[in-house]
Amino acid sequence: MAKNKLTAQYKGQTFTRTTDRVYTHIVVARYSHEHAVSQIAAYAVDLVQTNFAYYSRVVAGTSGHTQTEADVQRAKEFVEGGREASIARHTAKMTEEVAQRKAKGHYDKWVVIGWCGRPDLATKLLAQTSAPSYAEVHIVPVDA
């Protein structure tokens, strides 16, 4: 079967796909910088709460697993200064990562969430992906 080259354009970006299938619409999304920033503190707390006890056992040599020297060093860095210090380090690291993504234009680009063969499937996908992590989600028609 012959391959079709499909294209769709939205806000200056062009999305292409070569396929045997027929697609009529794509669902595109742009990530929310504000949402990413708002989740940093909670994610850092969750990360530390989930891992602190285990890394403490690794440092004490009571984890029940054989650890490499690099694993032990990483565990020492994780638990250094206690839980609050670990949370502060992870919060700062995640804040820097979000800032780097923003500087690279990550929150300005549109990404394809899915290619759909019917308008109703695009509408269904739109409803499923309208999460807070996205600033906007749209359905765009595809040109054959």
Image (tube, helix red, strand yellow):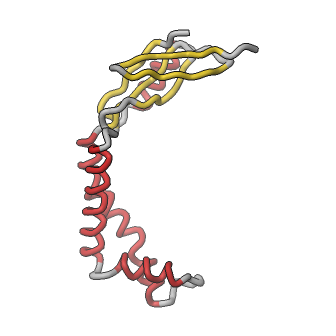
Could you tell me residue 48's position as x and y percent? 35, 69
Left or right: 69 with respect to 51? Answer: right
Q: Quadrant of the N terminus?
A: top right
Q: Residue furthest top?
A: 144
Task: Please indicate, yes or no, whether residue 132 appears anywhere in the rendered image.
Answer: no
Residue 55: percent from left, percent from top: 43, 78
Q: Report the quarter where the C terminus lies.
A: top right
Q: Can residue 129 be seen? A: yes
Label count reads 0
Q: Relative to residue 37, is residue 28 depicted above or below?
A: above
Foreground of the two, 108 or 21:
108
Residue 78 picture location, percent across and down = 37, 76
Above-or-below relation of 60 to 19: below
At x 47% / y 26%, what residue is drawn?
125
Relative image position of residue 120 (x, y in whole percent)? 50, 15
Name the residue at 31% across, 62% down.
Answer: 44
Position of 49 compared to 128: left or right? left
Q: Is residue 12 left or right of residue 116?
A: left
Q: Residue at position x 35%, y 62% from top? A: 46
Which residue is at the front of the view, 59 or 9?
9
Quarter of the view holding residue 76 = bottom left
Residue beneath the point at 64% across and 14% down:
4
- Is the residue 130 above or below the residue 96 in the image? above
